[in-house]
Image: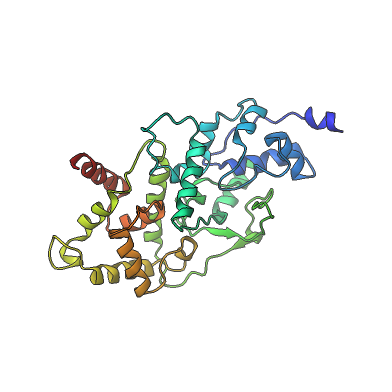
């Protein structure tokens, strides 16, 4: 039985548009026809339980070797089919040679945890995408951009995403699952939900993700950028300082338009908490390494994240 286990052929399939690595692994398990996920996991990752994590899949090096790079190199998979690049924009790869992008991602994950930022990545999907994909590809699958924090609306269908309501294992995995309407946990939308604003947040998050392996943003300079953009008449009465009370009220009203979504990324729920949150963003004791804050503050200030990048780079060069 063990001999047969190692002789199984791994199917050669193409990546589907915007498919996540987790989505590919679910499809491979289905094509292999294995009764147990541990059989597929051992074949792909040389481990009985690791590899099927939907956000930060482990043992990718083993996957690349076991599949003989049928699906690309480790760097290609990480940078195009996982959410890892979203967390890499604050990692300066100009200092020293970085040979493993994924180790950088875990460096940043550790940094976020040390700064008391909890990483929560619910498994999300679009109901309309699932229907269209069943017709076009014969299977619905998981999109990598749908899994990004701050992405809560489908770019293609302009509808809110839903959350997969299945339970995770003790290893933090959902197992092998596919987007199904009966497993959808809809967000409790109300009349305050602003789809247009959600689309702006989604574009900001996608921009951060798509530039994560190419762009380095100095987190030390971001507060200066935010203060420069916020120190206008609408946030204080002059163009040199920020009136924290006025700015906090503005940000609170901004967040209220998507408040039913934002609890998943731990945003302030009332005006007092918003004031504390904004103060820590504008005058931080330690740099803020959460890219979701970058997306939200940029949209609140009505600036694209790429413009914020450019301003940050100017402050770096002038200092």
Residue furthest right as drawn: 1
Q: Residue at x 31, y 58 (%)?
A: 284
39 vs 97, left or right, is right
Instruction: Using residue 5 as the reference point, say whether residue 222 is left or right of it.
Output: left
Q: Position of residue 200 (x, y in %)?
A: 36, 55
Examine the image and state in which quarter residue 297 appears: bottom left
Tell me if I can see residue 80 in this picture: no
Image quarter hosting the C terminus: top left
Tell me the quarter of the image containing the N terminus.
Answer: top right
What is the total number of numbered labels drawn onto the structure image? 0
- Color style of the picture: rainbow
The residue lying at 40 percent from left, 71 percent from top is 192
Q: As rendered, which of 285 and 9 lies closer to the eye?
A: 285
Percent across and percent down for residue 272 are: 35, 74
Viewer-proximal residue among 255 and 17 = 255
Q: Residue 83: percent from the left, percent from the top?
A: 50, 45
Q: Quadrant of residue 208?
A: top left
Relative placement, left or right, of 207 versus 148 is left
The image position of residue 159, as x and y in percent, is 48, 58
- The outermost residue toward the top is 68
Q: Residue at x 54, y 35 (%)?
A: 77
Residue 106 visible, this angle: yes
Nearer-the-camera pick, 60 or 259: 60
Q: Residue at x 39, y 34 (%)?
A: 93
């Amino acid at each position: 039985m063990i001999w047969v286990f190692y002789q199984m052929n791994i199917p050669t399939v193409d990546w589907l548009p915007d498919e996540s690595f987790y989505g590919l692994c679910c499809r491979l398990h289905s094509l292999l026809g294995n009764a147990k996920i541990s059989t597929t996991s051992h074949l792909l990752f040389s481990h009985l339980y690791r590899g099927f994590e939907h956000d930060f899949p482990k043992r990718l090096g083993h996957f690349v070797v076991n599949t003989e790079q049928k699906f690309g190199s480790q760097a290609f998979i990480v940078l195009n089919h996982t959410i890892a690049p979203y967390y890499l924009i604050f990692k300066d790869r100009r200092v020293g040679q970085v040979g493993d992008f994924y180790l950088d991602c875990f460096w940043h994950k550790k940094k976020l945890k040390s700064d008391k930022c909890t990483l929560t990545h619910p498994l999300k999907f679009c109901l309309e995408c699932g229907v269209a994909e069943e017709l076009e590809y014969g299977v619905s699958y998981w999109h990598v951009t749908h899994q990004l924090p701050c992405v809560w609306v489908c770019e293609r269908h302009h509808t809110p995403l839903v959350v997969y309501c299945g339970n995770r294992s003790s290893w933090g995995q959902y197992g092998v699952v596919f987007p199904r309407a009966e497993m959808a946990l809809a967000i409790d939308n109300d009349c305050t939900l602003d789809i247009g604003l959600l689309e702006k947040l989604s574009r900001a998050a996608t921009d951060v993700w798509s530039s994560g392996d190419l762009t380095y943003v100095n987190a030390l300079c971001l507060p200066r950028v935010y203060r420069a953009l916020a120190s206008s008449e609408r946030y204080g009465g002059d163009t040199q300082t920020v009136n924290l009370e006025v700015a906090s009220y503005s940000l609170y009203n901004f967040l209220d338009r998507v408040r039913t979504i934002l609890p998943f990324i731990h945003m302030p729920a009332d005006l007092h908490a918003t004031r504390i949150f904004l103060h820590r963003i504008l005058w931080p004791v330690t740099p803020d390494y959460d890219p979701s804050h970058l997306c939200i503050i940029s949209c609140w200030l009505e600036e694209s994240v790429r413009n914020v990048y450019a301003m940050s780079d100017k402050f770096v060069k002038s200092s």
